[in-house]
Image: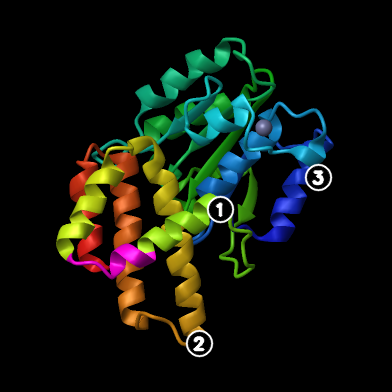
Amino acid sequence: MIFHQKQWQFFRKTAELGKMPHALLFYGQSSTNKNSLALEIVKLLNCEKENFNDRPCQTCRACRDIKKNIHPDLFIITPQENKEIVISQIRGLQSSLFLKAYSAPYKAVIINQAHFLNQDAQSAFLKLLEEPKGKTIFILITEYPEMLLPTIISRVEKFRIYDTSIKKQSSPRQKKLVSELVNIAKQDLFLRFKYAKTLAEEPQELKEVLDVWLGYFRELLLESINDKPVIYPMIKLKKILKTLQTTDFLLSTTSVNPRLALEILMLEL
Ligand SMILES: [Zn+2]
């Protein structure tokens, strides 16, 4: 994961001291990985390792379920197809939060693209924020914090999440994904589409794959900005990044056919 190290250390410390704020707002450019940071914080709070130094371990049941977005105490709200987060989505949360946590110390609510909360949904959400139930953390993620009610803004701790050029520690799996990508980019369209088909068969993994690729191309872009020789011209890098972001967005918020979305991406490489 690429995070701003100082911010990450801050959240680690806060979690360890049991002082994590009740509601966080992450804002900043779309290219920053606010969402991964939110998930890592939820892992940090709910990881099964006793010792905080070992958290998030990435391997316990809680860490794995959070990563796959299937943890019973993690609620992720994303805009519907019409690009709105509606009141029924927030009401659904209300009843879930009222129940006792299944297994985790913390219930967590992540609202992606929170600027798409419509007026009614924002009012309903404000009520949720005002009546904390047990150990619950709310994380709002947006590029446009000014679209949120000032009453919401005043009740959340705000963090600007910056793009970071700190080199990440790549895991063997991340390295494998990047080398697959580098290889496939050299192949003809037939093989690329075949690869898209294989990827689309594992929709659970897709988000991770796209995240790793986004990270890789962002780094290339940074290097190219710093005048280092890179295999793609900057214009092309920007185009690939944009397609990757669109693919990521489409796959996470709509029911677009993953194979089709990936084929479009493969055309760009
Ligand atoms: Zn863990």
Ligand 1 lies in quarter: top right
Nearer-N-terminus badge (2/1): 1
Mark 2 vs ligand 1: CB below 8 Å: no
Q: Specify the label residue 228 is tagged with.
A: 2
Label 1 element class: helix
Q: Would you call the spot at circle 3 few (<14 residues within 10 Å), some (14-19), or many (20 or more)?
A: some
Looking at the picture, how far across and down is residue 106, in whole percent? 66, 24
Report the mark closest to the observer, 1 or 3.
Answer: 1
**Residue beneath the point at 49% across and 27% down:** 75
Give the camera-side residue of 192 and 141: 192
Quadrant position of residue 221: bottom left
Q: Is residue 100 above or below residue 118?
A: above
Is 129 covered by the magenta stretch?
A: no
Work out which quarter of the rendered image holds the C terminus and state it: bottom left
1 or 3: tag closer to the N-terminus? 3
Q: Which marked residue is nearer to the observer: mark 2 or mark 1?
A: 1
187 magenta-colored: yes
Q: Is residue 34 above or below residue 87?
A: below
Q: Three-letter amino acid code at disc 1?
A: Pro
Q: Which residues are magenta?
A: 182-188
Quadrant of the image containing the N terminus:
bottom right
Disc 1 target residue: 172
> In the image, what residue type sits under mark 3?
Lys
Label 1–label 3 contact, CB within 8 A: no
Between marks 2 and 1, how big is the CA–CA gap? Answer: 25 Å
- Per the image, the residue denoted by label 3 is 13
Across and down, in percent, residue 24 comes to: 62, 42
